[in-house]
């Protein structure tokens, strides 16, 4: 499932602004990503992370600006937007990456091969008959990554994939994402978790409706950027734990949520 160098994806977001009535959810957001990149989209609730993903995926129109990409894109939304009452197995969910919502489309041999490869890639083939309701948060995220792979996507957007996932399971997800990055994919993960940034991401986009910083974690995530993103909370974290190398030291932290207007 490796992506050839000649076919590596690219993503360009140019001067994107999104306005909802009198509220500006995104303002003049610009960045470019090439294949072989694992990117963290960082910011507090209401910063526009989900809005940015909706725009890239074509779910939400832009007021101004433009999004261009070369490749096949898959979007894994926040878990709160998924109906867990539906009694689906792991295999059912990943096969949807091949058949879509068409119940009349019978999977063919190539569909079954891709689904098996995708589940093997995330370490869940042996559990393919398990119900989604039986899985942990980290296992569910790996299932959705497998579904994206079954779609033959090489640009994957993951919205808050670490939410409700323990540290060990987070590392399993990161290991899978790194292997996809090494195959030439673009992986973008929206999060407000500041743990081990340099170890997890090649690049970070610090977002608070506009781009506060864009670049390698150790360069982009400065104490000034922390204050712009999180206000006094950011300054407290900066004084206590930030060492300027793109990671928090000591025990794991999740940034305190701040009250903001509008959606993430």
Image (tube, rainbow, N blue to C red):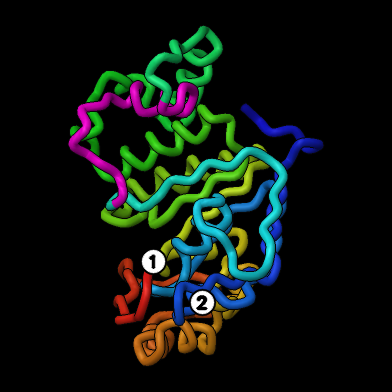
Badge number at residue 58 = none
Q: Quadrant of the C terminus?
A: bottom left
Tell me which numbered mark, 1 or 2, is placed earlier along the sequence. Answer: 1
| Disc 1: CA contacts within 10 A as few (<14), some (14-19) or many (>=20) | some
* Residue 47 placement (x, y as % from top left): 44, 74
- Residue extent of the magenta highlight: 81-101
Q: Which mark is residue 209?
A: 2
The reply to whether residue 219 is in sight is no
Q: Position of residue 232 (x, y in %)?
A: 37, 92
Extreme residue toward the top, this view: 109
- Which residue is rendered at x = 27% and y = 24% of the image? 89
- State which quadrant residue 140 falls in: top left
In this view, the residue in front, 169 or 59, is: 59
| Residue 21 lies in quadrant | bottom left
Position above or below: 229 against 181: below
Q: Secondary structure at mark 1?
A: loop
| Residue that appears at 41% across and 83% down | 230
Residue 31 vertical position relative to residue 56 in the rendered view, above or below: below
Query: Magenta stretch: residue 73 in it?
Result: no
Disc 1 marks which residue?
193
Quarter of the image where one finds residue 120:
top left
């Amino acid at each position: 499932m490796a992506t050839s160098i000649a076919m590596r994806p690219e993503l360009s977001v140019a001067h994107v602004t999104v306005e909802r009535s009198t509220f500006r959810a995104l303002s003049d957001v610009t960045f470019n990503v090439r294949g072989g990149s694992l990117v963290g989209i960082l910011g507090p609730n209401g910063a526009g992370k989900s809005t940015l993903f909706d725009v890239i995926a074509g779910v939400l129109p832009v007021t101004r600006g433009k999004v261009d990409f070369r490749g096949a894109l898959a979007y894994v939304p926040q878990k709160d937007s998924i109906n867990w009452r539906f009694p689906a197995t792991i295999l059912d969910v990943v096969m949807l990456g091949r058949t879509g919502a068409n119940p009349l489309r019978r999977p063919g041999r190539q569909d079954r091969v891709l689904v098996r490869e995708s589940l093997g890639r995330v370490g869940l083939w042996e559990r393919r008959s398990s119900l989604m309701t039986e899985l942990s948060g980290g296992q569910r995220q790996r299932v959705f990554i497998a579904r994206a792979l079954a779609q033959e996507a090489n640009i994957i957007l993951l919205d808050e994939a670490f939410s409700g996932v323990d540290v060990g399971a987070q590392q399993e997800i990161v290991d899978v994402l790194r292997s996809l990055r090494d195959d030439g994919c673009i992986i973008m993960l929206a999060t407000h978790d500041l743990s081990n940034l340099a170890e997890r991401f090649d690049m970070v986009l610090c977002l608070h409706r506009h781009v506060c910083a864009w670049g390698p974690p150790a360069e982009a995530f400065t104490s000034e950027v922390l204050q712009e993103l999180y206000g006094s909370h950011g300054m407290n974290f900066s004084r206590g734990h930030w060492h300027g190398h793109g990671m928090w030291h000591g025990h794991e932290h999740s940034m305190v949520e701040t009250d903001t207007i509008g959606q993430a």
